Amino acid sequence: MDKYSLLGFITLIIVFVGLLLSIFLLTVKTQNKIANRLLALYFIVFSIHISVFFYTSYIELPLVIEMLRDQIISLSSPLLFLYLVANIYSDFKLRYIHLCHLLPFLIEIILFIPNFYGVNHEERVIFTENYNSQIIVKISVVVGSVISLFYLILMFSELKKYKHLLVENYSSTTSFNYNWLYQLTIVISSIFVFSQFKQLYKFTGTDIETLNILRLVLIILLLGFLTWIMLKSMYQPELFKGIDSGHKLVKTLVKKDNSKTVSESSQQESIEANIQRLNKFMEEEEPFLDSSLTIQKLAHQFQMPSRELSILINHHLNQHFFDFVTSFRIKKAILLLKNPMNKKLTILEILYDVGFNSKSPFNKAFKKHTGLTPTEYRAKFS
């Protein structure tokens, strides 16, 4: 089997897996339907674009259809971006404003109107035969690369904001999908870089064998990418849990508060009093024992608006809500580990008792605060 035949065979597998995964995403019963549909659309677009390496040996499509098939890939970056945003925010809805993400595809079509779409069949044939040497094609590749890079930057920006919102509003982040979305973005970035290298060689290289090898490697990477997502979807269908888009970063809330005219001394006295009252409440009422504690829940129990409580903890105490709650959980765990009466309690039982819901975050937080693992601490001090 030569390289091109292998390329066609692997492409067929990718198209099959992509369409199968699309059907799964469109039919599976889940709360996050919008995100699943966006990802399904991505796989459909991707499958249509990549299918050329399979069907080209058997059928010949009209030139306009071929060009549209090639240009439809410009929708992939917007779809992945919207998929990420739909996963981050549980109340995400598609609106008319999101139609702006069709612009990359429309730009591609507009670029080719003078030389391809707006001419007769004979001129299209000549254009296609000299495709790689056409200036407009090179411009299109550059524009497409810039747009893809722009969307990658947007994705990393949203992830950064998401991470800050998690630690500022939630006491446990293990049930959220930040790690999955970050991994997805890193993988997409890696494939993007390799794809750009392949494109560069396509227009500057002279060895068709090398180009086919690069195509083959890219196809194998894409097959691995699809397989990874499919396994994630099968084994972790409840992986995704978004947050409310109403959450605001504390730095945004602080900027609004700074516009208010309040005397600095009286404001500082009020802040210090609230901090003392909050610490006392945490020690006496122990709300941190609730593993699903959020800043909204604590604000309700503490009888303070969640906005003010968020500023108090994240800004005035200079601690993320996640770290603030974790410190009380670790203090409680230390007391339990030191108490000889608790020798029969396992580390797992203790971490659940103090509000953690998995072993890894507990061990990491405990060692950060004490310099020892829970087992080492118990052996040394109990």
Image (cartoon, rainbow, N blue to C red):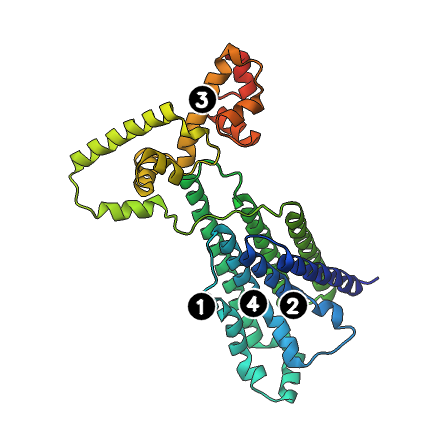
Q: Sequence order check: which comes first, mark 1 or mark 4? A: 4
The secondary structure type at the circle numbered 2 is helix
Secondary structure under tag 4 reads: helix
Q: CA distance from mark 2 to mark 3?
A: 56 Å
Q: Is residue 351 above or below residue 338?
A: below
Using the image as rendered, state which of residue 342 and residue 382 is in the foreground. Answer: 342
Q: Badge 1: few (under 14), some or many (20 or more) residues near its Cα, within 10 Å?
A: few
Residue 181: x %, y % from top left: 54, 49
**Around disc 3, counting alpha carbons within 10 Å, would you say few (fewer than 14), some (14 to 19), or many (20 or more)?**
many
Instruction: Point out the frontmost of discs 1 and 4.
Output: 1
The residue at which mark 2 appears reads as 49
Q: Quadrant of the N terminus?
A: bottom right
Q: Quadrant of residue 133?
A: bottom right
Asked if disc 2 and disc 4 are in contact, CB closer than 8 Å, the reply is no
| Circle 3 residue | 332
- Residue furthest right as drawn: 1
| Dot 3 amino acid type | Lys
Residue 353, percent from left and from top: 51, 25
Q: Residues within 10 Å of mark 4 (few under 14, many from 20)?
A: many
The kind of residue on which mark 4 rests is Ser
- Separation (CA) of disc 2 from disc 1: 26 Å
Give me the residue at 50% from left, 69% from top. 102
Q: In the figure, is residue 160 to the left or right of 278?
A: right
Is label 2 in contact with label 3 (beta carbons under 8 Å)? no
How far is mark 1 from mark 4, CA to CA?
Answer: 19 Å
Q: Earlier in the sequence, mark 3 or mark 1?
A: 1
Q: CA distance from mark 3 to mark 1?
A: 50 Å
- Residue underneath mark 1: 96
Mark 4 = which residue?
Answer: 74
